[in-house]
Amino acid sequence: MPKTLVEKILSNKVKHDVKPGDTIVADVDFTACHDGSGPLALRLMKKRNWDGVFDPKKVMFCTEFGPSPAKELSNEHSLIRNFAMKHNCYWHEGGTGNIHTHLLEDYVKCGDLIVAGDSHTTTHGALGAFATGMGSTDMLCVLRMGKTWLKVPESYLVQVDGELPKGVYSKEIFLKLLKDIKSDGAIYKALEFKGSTIESLSMDARFTISNMGVEAGAKVAIMETDETTEKFLEKMGRKNDYQKIKADDNAKYAKTIKIDATKLEPMVAAPHYVENGELVRNIKDLKVDIVFLGSCTNGRLEDLHIAADILKGKKVAPWIRFIVIPNSHKVYLEAFKDGTFTTLAEAGAMIQAPNCGPCMGVHQGIPGDGEIVVSTQNRNFKGRMGNPNAFVYLASPATAAATALKGYLTDPREVL
Amino acid sequence: MLKGRYEGKAWKFGDNVSTDSIAPGRLMHLRSNPEEFAKHVLEDANPEFPKNVKPGDFIVADSNFGCGSSREIAPLIIKLSGVAAVLAKSFGRIFYRNAINNGMLLIECDTGKIKEGDMLIVDFDKAEITKKDDKEFRETFNLQKTEKVIVNAGGLLDYISSNNSLDDI
Ligand code: SF4
């Protein structure tokens, strides 16, 4: 039987042919927990008098909201830091990145089964991995036994073809998909992205799409691997982690969704739902208070470059708080070295150490009542950024930079 | 362990109630203190809910309840608030697993005809929902095998403790 990408990977894992609907128990290739999912998993571990992990070389812990903004969180950080040290697991301190950037830069291999304690684990589908997020109890099970149970999902093929017009980026591809299929459009399903547009994208841009897969409810958001994937892994010093992953011709998809990239225009998701896609040019005179360029969705080097190109030699509007957070230490260093940070700082950006920042409303830029935020992150749910009385618009880095410049929500085509 | 029958009041919510609404990030410092966090459960969606929810009540939502983040504190504080079960047209996948893993029941069913304040009877033996004051109303549901096994064991960790393995789940 011809297989989709996920059917191939999962069949390979359990060494027999699987089909959608099957329940399987499979070995996990790599796993990670952050300061959100880790502490509860470890407290539950203690309660059961269990100690240790199945294989420390397959386990990473990190803090995302660091340096810590509150003593309660500092104690949670200590809990997972001490555990990681004691058991020789990989460890990344808060202020050096978010969980997904660590995973994609240092650990995930093509064809892996990755389970991590964060919903945006779908990010790693861009590397041809079956990567999905789970909560603390499931994570404890993985940490102890190196296994998890899964239902093999049906796959939807998302076929994206054509050249992206000026001012339009991979963010728009996902926002358009969400507008079409809605945020419950792929619950329990696998999304498989394919087509000439996807092939033309850099890894930085592909990660944005897979990262947001969970926003349509998807279990995984996966792509075939190619030369671009290989070059990326080589750049990360992990050439051997590359493997060609391809779906079979004639694989059966429960649904095919087509997106014509040539018809896309700059788009935002308006408050308070990710599925509220609207063309930027249709929203007039929206004065903005905060622009956030960062998060695991769009804080990579390419994103910073797009913003720096727009802001070079210019100043952001005086009332704007323009928060820039690169999403890893590697990106941070590169942006220092190639002058991107100088450009952004001269334009008025507040550049912070790599972490999640205000994305989840924990620290470093919580909006006030009634304030309007344009953010490159992946969620705009009511209260997401720490204030249920604020309004968050999700946008591409170009729309974010153009908006920071003008102070009003701005179509990047006006400034490119 | 699955009890046969629950009776309680319906609290109605709409589509796409996210884990950010159930357990907001701005209160993350309360994560290590679930009892305290539970006093704020769903307050951004309905401020009356945490103040007036009674043990045995039901949360009744439209589609995609619990979408968003993987934070397990979300189903945990719903459980702590005494809610007997959550009924929705569909659930966020991770929330669904998290709830089941904690021995909590989620029922996927057509919630369209249930109104705020309805007194519901959920019968697990018969797999049906009825209303106390409306003899016409009857809605059935299915529970999946794996989920039933986990809830009946008291949650995933109890299942593993008593079976010493995951392989036959
Ligand atoms: S950047 Fe935001 S979405 Fe990404 S891991 Fe951090 S809190 Fe979660």
Image (tube, rainbow, N blue to C red):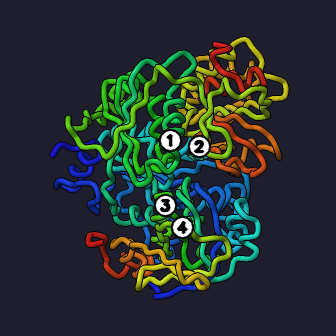
Q: Is mark 2 within 8 Å of ligand 1?
A: no
Mark 1 Cα shell of 10 Å, populated few (<14), some (14-19), many (≥20): many
- Residue shown at the point (74%, 30%) measured from the top left: A322
Image position of A72 (left or right of A287): left
Q: Is mark 3 within 8 Å of ligand 1?
A: no
Q: Quadrant of residue A375?
A: top right
Chain letter behind tag 3: B
Relative height, residue A137 to residue A324 (above, below): below
Task: Determine if residue A328 is in view.
Answer: no
Give the labeled residue for mark 2.
A274
Give the labeled residue for mark 4.
B111
Chain letter behind tag 2: A
User: Mark 1 vs mark 4: same chain?
Assistant: no
- Check disc 4 and report its element: helix, strand or loop: loop
- Residue A19 coordinates in the image, percent (x, y): 23, 54
In the image, A328 versus A119, the foreground residue is: A119
User: Between marks 2 and 3, how big is the CA–CA gap?
Assistant: 17 Å
- Check disc 3 and report its element: helix, strand or loop: loop
Image position of B2 (left or right of A76): left
Chain letter behind tag 4: B
Residue contact at pointers 1 and 4, CB within 8 angstroms: no
Disc 4 marks which amino acid?
Thr
Disc 3 marks which amino acid?
Ser
In the image, A410 versus A345, the foreground residue is: A410
